[in-house]
Structures are given as C-alpha cells and as structure tokens.
Amino acid sequence: FAPDVIYAHQISNATRALPLNYLLKKPLVYDEHGSYLLDINPKKRYLLWEKLVVKTVDKVIGAAVDVKKVLTEHYGIQEEKIETMERKEIEKLQIELFNETIKRAKRSPFYSKVFKKKKLPERITSIEEIKEFPFTTKDDLRKSYPFGMLATDIEKIVRMHGSSGTTGKSTLVFHTKNDIERWADLIARCLYMIGVRDCDVFQNMMSYGLFTGGLGLHYGAEKIGALVIPIG
C-alpha cells in the first residue's frame, strides 16, 4: 500500500462529494445552460477547500497529512501564483501580455497592413480597449498563405501544422520552439486541473496528422509525468 496516495484520494473523494452550496454557505446561481456560476475568486476558493479539509481530515482517515500538498496535487492548482490571482492582478497581466502581442503581431506582413489601414493603437491601457481590434477570420488565414502571419524569422520556425483544405485553401500555423513549450505548459495546466497526475496512463486518441491538436495533448501529459500512449 501507498498510504500518502490513499490518504490524498480519501480526502479528495470526501470533500468533492460535498455540494458547493454547503461549501460556500450560499445558494448557487445557474446560467441558461444549467452550469453553476461560482462567484468567488480562485484564491478564496482554495482557502475554503483548505479549511474544509482541515475540518474533515480526522473524520475521514483518522490521520494527519500535509493539507497544502493534498490541495495542490488533487484540486488542480499547479502554478499557484498564476492560478490564484485576484481579478485586478489578472487584468493587469492581460493588458501587459496583450501589449506584447500587439508588438509582436506588427512584425508580420499581414498585421502590419491591418494596423496601418485601421489605425489601431500600439498599446492599450484597459481591457475594454480590446474591442477596437478586429477578429482574425478563416479568410484572413487564407489570404496570408503561406507566411503572411509570421512574426519571426522563418529560421526560428520548428513546426508547421495545416488544415486539410477541403473547404478552400489550406490554412497554416507555425510554431517556434518557445511556442511549443508554452503550448505544453498550458495543456499541462488544463490536464492537471481535471485530475491528471504522474501516476496516470494517458491514452491520446487525438490525430497525429498535419492538422492536429494531438501533439499538444501529448506534450502536456508528458510534462505532468503521465505515461502517454500515442494511439491517435
């Protein structure tokens, strides 16, 4: 037996079985699709879970465990600093990263023309200003074929994916080494959040062809440490 694993799962199962309205001490609000709207920031939710686990741990397993370890490993918090930010901190980071995105996008032939034509600002100071920027459409991707949206030197590109082209000209997506690493990080966080751990076997059914999301899931699961079976 592996007591730490057993304890962690026992706590996880016991606390997850409790209804959210019991945890939050207030009724839940549902949207039009029947999904509950949790009006509480991640950090506060984390502290609620911690308080609940401390209260129930003795009743559940009758032994002391590392509560913080249980929460981070079994309640989907992988990068605590990022994933428990307050709303104001999140918006500040969004503005910072959006401005960096603008700076990079302007290097591409396609977006440099869009910025000049629409006289778009070079930076934003609030999230509301994002409304001034146009969406990127499938038609835009086709018009920029093949390299019109590249925002870096082609020598730095290490991967190309593309659509089948069955409904029109194929659309291409390129990645640098850093793009792929960030892709893996983000997928790892998503998988971690839903409970994938290094003790799991991850059978990846996604396609590994030219048009693929399979490799992102593959790298994300590997980053967590799961045993990956690339069967797609």
Image (cartoon, rainbow, N blue to C red):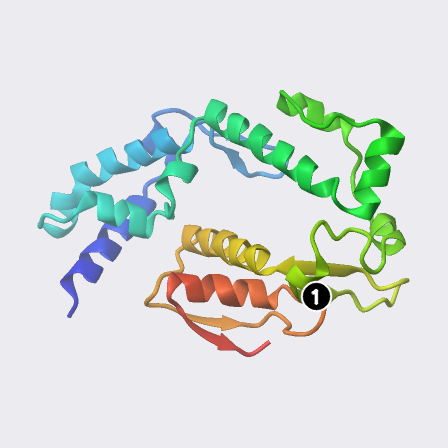
Residue 2: x and y in percent read 17, 67
Query: The N terminus lies in which quarter of the figure?
Result: bottom left
Question: What residue sits 51% from the left and 51% below the top?
Answer: 186
- Which residue matches tag 1? 160
Residue 50: x and y in percent read 25, 37
Question: Would residue 120 be visible to someone looking at this image?
Answer: yes
Please state if 123 lies on the left or on the right of 88 as rendered.
right
Tell me the quarter of the picture where residue 91 sits.
top right
Residue 65: x and y in percent read 14, 49
Please state if 219 lies on the left or on the right of 58 as rendered.
right
Please state if 63 lies on the left or on the right of 133 as rendered.
left
The amino acid marked with disc number 1 is Met
Q: Nearer the viewer, residue 192 or 79?
A: 79
Residue 12: x and y in percent read 28, 50
Question: What residue sits 52% from the left and 26% below the top?
Answer: 92
Tell me the quarter of the picture where residue 162 sits.
bottom right
Query: The C terminus lies in which quarter of the figure?
Result: bottom right
Question: Would residue 17 be visible to someone looking at this image?
Answer: no
44 over 171 or under it: above or below:
above
Question: What residue sits 22% from the left and 61% below the top?
Answer: 5
Question: What SS does tag 1 mark?
Answer: strand
